[in-house]
Image (spheres, rainbow, N blue to C red):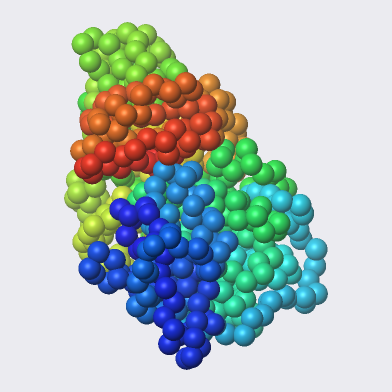
Amino acid sequence: MPDVPAITNQFDYLVPAEWEHDGRSAALAIGSRVRIQLHGRRIGGWVIGLDVEPPAGVELLPLAKLSGHGPNAEVFELAEWIAHRWASSATKVLRAASPPRNIASLPPRQRVVVEAERPASWVDPAFADAGAIVRIAPAADRWPVVEAALAFGNPLFIAPSVAMARQLAARLRRTRVSTALLPDDWARAAAGAAVVGTRSAALATVHEPGSVVVLDEHDDAMQEERTPTWHARDVALKRAGDWGVPCVLVSPTPTVDAQERLPLIAPTRAEEFAGWPTVELIDRRDEQPGRLGLFSDRLVTELRGDRRIACILNRKGRAQLLACNTCGEVVACDRCEASVRLDDDELICRRCAATRPVICQSCGGMKLKNLRMGVSRAREELEALVGEPVTEMTATSTHGSVDARVAVGTEALLHTGARFDTIVFLDIDQELLALRQRAAEQALGLLARAARLVGTRAGGGRLIVQTRSPDHVVLRAAQTANPSLAAEADRDRRKLMNWPPFGAQAMVSGQAADAFIARFGTPLGVEIHGPSDGSWLLRSADVATLADRLAEVKRPDGRLRIEVDPPGV
């Protein structure tokens, strides 16, 4: 199989005679990485079959070079499954599954099993049968899950970030566990070790795996943004099932998708409550939208104290917020709870396109105002309030010292790992009412990430949330440390709207999108919506129907992007 995504054909090559004499022929196996001559140029590729019968009358070219070890046969089957499930090329998957450099030989194979005596834990039942979801509070230690996984030998740990993967690998090594941190330790993983990595670790070649553990299953980083848009959770479940080992998903706020696949195991309510910080809601409905500042009186008091504070304000324009001029309530869709826009004297939902008259559902008012905020303005006002320099941070830039007592930024600030005493969400409504179908789930995940940085309530950790929707189920879930409240409401909404995991979706965009949709036709069981901003949305009751139809359509010439389970929808 050539390492060229645009080429879907497979080619036969001859093993050079001299390879029989120097031992390279014996080292050649399914998955080996080689160099080949194709159309006058030399490219890389993977061996996917040995001792095949070539077409009659064809003179085969010899292999040019044996580069080294690559993904094993099981990973090749996985790559084909991912390519079909997410409507893309297996080559892209194999690139992510291959070692970053040539591997000439593997270390001696081994099976790492830690059999040290340890007390029974409430997480142990998660490793029975096919596995389970373990809900652990944000500030609680996840090490008991790691210890339980080690007892099964050669566990595979998948983390959402490089920093978390490195921290886990370092802790495992301190306990004298043979550990392979991907991608650098690809050879050690293939020979047998406790394997640790980020999303691409779900594609790793692992020797005799004993269990699979996905940490922070809810994190958006677990889904590939490039095509194929596969999710590490789904791939981990697939691989664990093929291996016959338990798959354990760990999260403070498990997704609905996960809870539809595996049973949930949670600590006692007292233990979970203790693992969250204090969550304080500031109700801003009584403040007039036209005179709404960035900082409430309660927040000003907090800022003028001596605590280290981070203020979060996303300015990405995910939702244009409207609020009632009379009662201050944020105006949302009564069907799916997303933000709405005003168009020709009616309110139109930006997510599901439902319409209704310009009337506030809370007080009946008919006058609305826009709410707009920005990070740069927030920094200026903060510096005036606290009388000291304030750091501003976004995903692309940082202004100010990382050691400043007060910082403001987008959610990128939460990914730095910096510790704070208080984290403030200046406008959580922008997240709660975002256009994305997973807005509620992602908003709760954002609160959980912040909760991990400030620590427990007993340690003084505090989240302050400014909102015009204090009764929103996500905020109640965070305040009571009970994520099940939000999950149940989200599950009901998704069932009603036929959103994943209760339906399948694909976004088609690019220069050739119109031509592809024309070839796609109107197959039974698939709805076609669009075009909208040059994109088409395909919806089906199940993944198999959508995947099969996408695979049947010949792709036209031109740039085309197909996102199955699109992460941004």
Which x, y percent locates residue 8?
37, 52
The answer to whether residue 318 shows anywhere in this view is no
Residue 67 vertical position relative to residue 529 in the rendered view, above or below: below
Residue 347 at x, y percent in the picture: 30, 15
Q: Position of residue 335 (x, y in %)?
A: 45, 18
As drawn, which residue projects farthest toward the bottom? 22
Hey, which quadrant is residue 469 in on the image?
top left
Q: Note whether 270 is above or below 494 in the view shown.
A: below
Quick one: quadrant of the C terminus? top left
Query: Is residue 424 toward the left or the right of residue 325 in the image?
Result: right
Q: Quadrant of the N terminus?
A: bottom left
Name the side, left or right, on which 449 lies relative to 59. right
Relative to 34, does residue 252 appear above or below in the rendering? Answer: above
Q: Is residue 507 visible?
A: yes
Point 46% across, 68% down: residue: 47
Residue 34, picture quadrant:
bottom left
| Left or right position of 544 against 310 | right
Work out whether residue 31 or residue 427 is closer to the camera in this orientation and state it. 31
- How many badges with numbers are in the image? 0
Give the image location of residue 274, x and y in percent.
63, 52
Q: Residue at x 41, y 65 (%)?
A: 12
The residue at the point 43 percent across, 60 percent down is 56
Residue displayed at 61% across by 59% down = 213
Q: Nearer the viewer, residue 74 or 248?
A: 74
